[in-house]
Each structure stands twice: as C-alpha cells, then as structure tokens.
Amino acid sequence: MAFSDKLRGQIDKRIQAAKTAFRAGAKDILSDAKSLCPVKTGKLKDSIKMTEAKNGEMFIISANAQNKKGINYAKFVEFDPRIARPFLYPAFYNNVDSVIENVKAALEGGR
C-alpha cells in the first residue's frame, strides 16, 4: 500500500471520528434544549428536533410548535423579552466548548 493511500485512510478515519463527536455534541445540545424548554402543554418541547445535513457536517436544531392559528411560537419564547425563557441559544452556549474540544480530540486521534 502506498504512503498516500495510508495517509488518506488515516485522514478518512479522523474525519469520521470528528463527525461522530460532532453528532454526539449536537445530541447533547438537543437534550439540553429539551431540558431548558419551558413546559406548559409539552407541545413546544416535543417540537424540538435535530436534522443532520451535509453528511454529518452540519446539524440543525429547531423548534416549530404552532398555536391554533398556525403561528410558530417558539421564536417568541426564545426571543421575546416579556417571556424571557430562551432554551435553544442557552443549550448551544452550554455545550459549544465541549463539542469543539471533542471534535478537536477526534481530529488529533484521541490524544
């Protein structure tokens, strides 16, 4: 096996490990968002979902609960200062450092 093939194999292995670490971090953010979400009926908490994009290179965590008029009210809970019950951004900020460290460790080969 040529050196370039061995190198490519090592790079692919570390990229996959980084994607696995990133996915685990996204799941931690998802879990934290659900635990921070205010619960009145449970509809908002149940609407919090994670979508994987770009083959594991991006994760979208969103909440899309709607009221009876079809209005997505997650944005009001998250951003309206009168409600002041954000849950998505705090979940992200609570976990971002550990996600970065875990992905970095995966890329470095677990060192």
Image (cartoon, grey):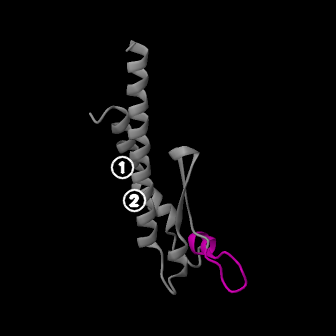
* Rendering coords of residue 20 (x, y %): 40, 46
* Rendering coords of residue 51 (x, y %): 55, 58
- Label annotation for residue 98: 1
Check disc 2 and report the residue beneath it: 28
Task: Count neighbours of disc 1 (C-alpha within 10 A) and say few if under 14, some if 14 to 19, many if 20 or more.
Answer: some
In this orientation, which residue lies closer to the viewer: 62 or 10?
Answer: 10
- Which residue is at 38% across, 34% downward? 107
Quarter of the image with the N terminus in it: top left
Magenta span main SS:
loop
Please say whether residue 22 is one of the residues in the magenta stretch: no
Is 66 placed above or below 13 here? Answer: below
Q: Tell me the mark number nearer the camera, choosing from 2 and 1.
A: 2
From this viewpoint, which residue is outermost toward the left? Answer: 111
Image marks 2 and 1: residues in contact by CB distance under 8 Å = yes
Task: Count neighbours of disc 2 (C-alpha within 10 A) and say few if under 14, some if 14 to 19, many if 20 or more.
Answer: some
- Which residue is at 43% across, 31% downward? 12
From this viewpoint, which residue is outermost toward the front? Answer: 1
* Rendering coords of residue 108 (x, y %): 34, 31
User: Distance of mark 2 from mark 1, alpha carbons?
Assistant: 10 Å
Would residue 84 appear left or right of 100 to someone viewing this image?
A: right
* Kind of residue sitting beneath label 1: Ser
Q: Which residues are magenta?
A: 65-80
